[in-house]
Image (cartoon, rainbow, N blue to C red):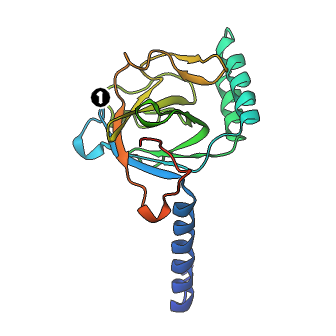
Amino acid sequence: MKIPFLLSATRTLALVGLLAASSLEAQAAALFTLKGEAFDARYPEQRELRLSVLGWTAPEKMDAIEAEYQTYASAAEKDHAAFQNFLQLQDTQGYLFTKAATGHTIKYAWQEGEGEAARMVLLVTPALKARTAHMWNTPNNDPAPFSLVEIQVDGDEYVIKSSLDTAISADSSGRLQLDGFDAAPEFGRLTDATPYYLKTQDSAPRSS
């Protein structure tokens, strides 16, 4: 029987230091972080919801993603695997985590507005609830490999809604958004959890 390789104390400390440095670097790279709860979780201890945005999708890349989405959405038989492969090739703009072991990667992100009119739209993959049906009162059985989420400001909180509960549309510029945000049920609510030393004038969300 082989004996597992054991790191020396020196190498163990070096590895811990490297992991800590990597974690701090990832945290510092985030424009902002929001934390809150997802309302449809089956149990209270599973309601944790965290969002970190690293950046916004460049306009020319947004155009490409939107065009690919329209091709995917308009097909008589949607090629979910092809669209998923396309999304995987796009730049990662952040992460959305529930209490599940694995999170959701943001592959499309834009924002507009200031103060109470501020909003942001994010496309995340895999789709919300799709791989963790046991965690939710209403699991997601749709084969689509993504979800679109939109976040709007409500006082000191950020209301998040998703394409699980309403359709996706495009604005006059072709930007993807939720169709009927106001009437859709809330997926969750978040508050700003960005460390003060990471906040900059250009950071979002634009709530003030």
In the rendered image, the vertical position of residue 95 relative to residue 64, given as above or below: below
Dot 1 lies on which element? loop
Quarter of the figure that contains the N terminus = bottom right
Residue marked by disc 1: 137
Examine the image and state in which quarter residue 173 appears. top right
In the rendered image, the vertical position of residue 31 relative to residue 88, given as above or below: below
Please tell me which residue is depicted at 67% across the width and 11% down the height of the picture: 74
Q: Nearer the viewer, residue 20 or 171?
A: 171
User: Would you call the spot at circle 1 few (<14 residues within 10 Å), some (14-19), or many (20 or more)?
Assistant: few
| Residue 8, x across and y down, in percent | 54, 90
Looking at the image, residue 71 sits to the left or right of residue 195; the answer is right
Looking at the image, residue 86 sits to the left or right of residue 12; the answer is right
Disc 1 residue type (three-letter) = Asn
Q: In the current view of this chain or complex, which residue is farthest to the left?
A: 44
Looking at the image, residue 45 sits to the left or right of residue 10; the answer is left
In the rendered image, the vertical position of residue 181 relative to residue 205, given as above or below: above
Please tell me which residue is depicted at 64% across the width and 16% down the height of the picture: 172
Q: Nearer the viewer, residue 188 or 114?
A: 114
| Residue 41, x across and y down, in percent | 30, 36
| Residue 142, x across and y down, in percent | 50, 21
Q: Nearer the viewer, residue 196 or 25?
A: 196
In the rendered image, the vertical position of residue 201 relative to residue 123, given as above or below: below
Q: Nearer the viewer, residue 68 or 151?
A: 151
Please tell me which residue is depicted at 43% across the width and 20% down the height of the picture: 181
Q: Is residue 122 visible?
A: no
Q: Is residue 64 visible?
A: yes
Quarter of the figure that contains the C terminus = top left
Examine the image and state in which quarter residue 186 appears. top left
